[in-house]
Amino acid sequence: MGFAVEKTMRYRLGLGIDSHRIGPGGPMRLGGDDIPGEYHLIGHSDADVLLHAITDALLGAAGLEDIGQLFPDTAAENRGRDSAELLRLAWAEVARSGFQIVNFDCVVRMEQPKLAPHKTAIRRRIAAILELDVDQISIKGKTGEATGDIGQSRLVEAHCIALLVRKSESA
Ligand SMILES: [Zn+2]
């Protein structure tokens, strides 16, 4: 019965969480945009923590393998790789599985730089990558209240939930 329910369920929810350490020197690649400032994120790819969380939310909602399995950080081809390209590839897989995106809701936890001045540009960039309307993407910034790894500007964390809907209800 579980299988039958899964096959006919119209909506699917997915959660993606990612974090990257902060290093000195900007700009910071975030949500496919370059944010000027004193810091960048450290990682095997371009370390775009927000796009990684979005990618995992999409893949999770579709029940596919996660970003680390699809694009392993041990592979030389993924070194310094543009995360927008990874997101596009993951979205193509999800779309092939028969889904459309309803919306995303994302939280970026980071002490600085402040996210607010860049939110609109990031939402537009993500909308362009996924061919969505800007109002399908919500991004909120939260600080670490000056405590812990986030508050001490050692870490940036992104959380994202994605809602997908099957393109056709009956099969
Ligand atoms: Zn990542």
Image (cartoon, helix red, strand yellow):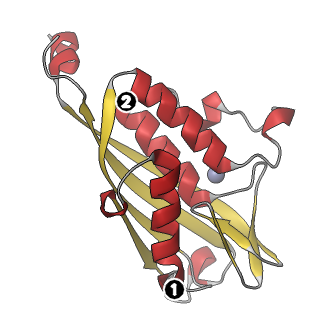
Percent across and percent down for residue 93 are 49, 26
In the image shown, does 152 or 103 lie closer to the viewer? 103
Q: In this view, does 50 lie to the left or right of 149?
A: left
Which quarter shows the C terminus? top left
Q: Given the image, on which type of amino acid does mark 2 rest?
A: Ala
Q: How crowded is mark 2: few (under 14 residues within 10 Å), some or many (20 or more)?
A: many
Q: Determine which quarter of the picture holds residue 20.
A: bottom right
**Which residue is labeled 2 in the image?**
62
Using the image as rendered, state which of residue 97 and residue 157 is in the foreground.
97
- Residue 58 on image: x %, y %: 42, 40
Say which element carries label 1.
helix
- Answer whether residue 74 is visible to the viewer in this image: no
> Is residue 73 among the parts visible in the rendering?
yes
- The quarter holding residue 69 reads top right
Q: How crowded is mark 1: few (under 14 residues within 10 Å), some or many (20 or more)?
A: few
Q: Mark 1 points at which residue?
A: 117
Who's the residue at 22% across and 16% down the image? Answer: 7
Residue depth check, mark 1 versus mark 2: number of the one nearer the observer:
1
Mark 2 C-beta to ligand 1 under 8 Å: no
Of callouts 1 and 2, the N-terminal one: 2
In-image side of 155 versus 171 (left or right): right
Number of numbered discs overlaid on the protein picture? 2
Tell me the amino acid under the disc marked 1: Pro
Q: Where is residue 118 in the image (x, y as percent from the top left)?
A: 53, 79
Determine the residue positioned at 62% across, 49% down.
84
Q: Is residue 53 above or below residue 37?
A: above
Up/down of 104 relative to 124, above or below:
above
Tell me whether the residue at label 1 lies in contact with that at label 2, contact meaning CB atoms closer than 8 angstroms: no
User: Residue at position x 71%, y 81% from top?
Assistant: 36
